Image (cartoon, helix red, strand yellow):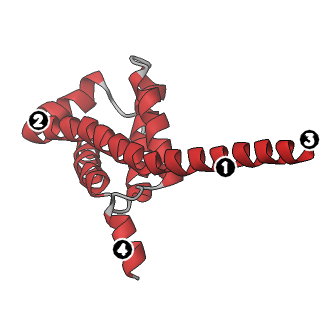
Amino acid sequence: MFIQISKVVHLIKTSIECFIKYTSKLESLLLLIIRLWIANIFWKSGILKFNDFSSAIELFTNEHPVPFLPPVIAAYSAVIFELGCSILLVLGLGARFAVIPLLIMTAVIQFTYFTHDDHFYWAILLSVILVRGAGFFSVDRLIRYKM
């Protein structure tokens, strides 16, 4: 009886280890998908502002003023961070640092305008990158293992 129990325990332990091994391989793929999805959102927003910068200033002046920034600085900051951080996220270069300005922007949007719940979900996904990093498919990983 004891031998059979130990075999069952061993089988369960082996199954759990196998499950963890294979599901952990999905982590980097999911991190890549999250990075690309979030980068796409901010890239589109940044490109719209960049292509019609006068409208971006108008937007930050009348429709969505940032409480603590002048409209011109808010517009420049938004374009720089949305485009720059999107590029960094796609590459997986400094991803943990790249999400910080995007998290701050998302928090300002969420707590100032309350218009959509999307920003809350963006913050969750950005937080995943902040905590877990860029994953296997990233320049960060290449740099880490070259040094």
Q: Is residue 97 something that shows in the picture?
A: yes
> Which residue has dot 2 on it?
54
Between the residue at mark 2 and the residue at mark 3, the CA separation in whole angstroms equals 80 Å
Q: For the residue marked with disc 4, what is the amino acid?
A: Ile
> Which residue has dot 3 on it?
1
Q: Considering only order in the chain, which callout, 4 or 3, is on the residue closer to the N terminus?
A: 3
Mark 2 closeness class: few <14, some 14–19, many ≥20 residues within 10 Å: few
Mark 1 closeness class: few <14, some 14–19, many ≥20 residues within 10 Å: few
> Which residue has dot 1 on it?
14
Find residue 38 and name its label.
none
> Which residue has dot 4 on it?
143
Mark 4 closeness class: few <14, some 14–19, many ≥20 residues within 10 Å: few
Which residue: 14% across, 40% down? 47
Q: For the residue marked with disc 2, what is the amino acid?
A: Ser
Q: Considering only order in the chain, which callout, 3 or 2, is on the residue closer to the N terminus?
A: 3
Q: Give x and y (percent) for residue 95.
A: 38, 56
Q: Nearer the viewer, mark 2 or mark 4?
A: 4
The picture quadrant where one finds residue 70 is: top left
Q: Considering only order in the chain, which callout, 2 or 1, is on the residue closer to the N terminus?
A: 1
65 up-or-down from 34: above or below: above
Q: Residue furthest right?
A: 2
The picture quadrant where one finds residue 60 is: top left
Q: For the residue marked with disc 3, what is the amino acid?
A: Met
Q: Nearer the viewer, mark 1 or mark 4?
A: 1
Q: Give x and y (percent) for residue 22.
A: 50, 48
Image-based side of 73 in relation to 52, left or right: right
Between the residue at mark 1 and the residue at mark 3, the CA separation in whole angstroms equals 20 Å
Which residue: 48% across, 27% down? 111
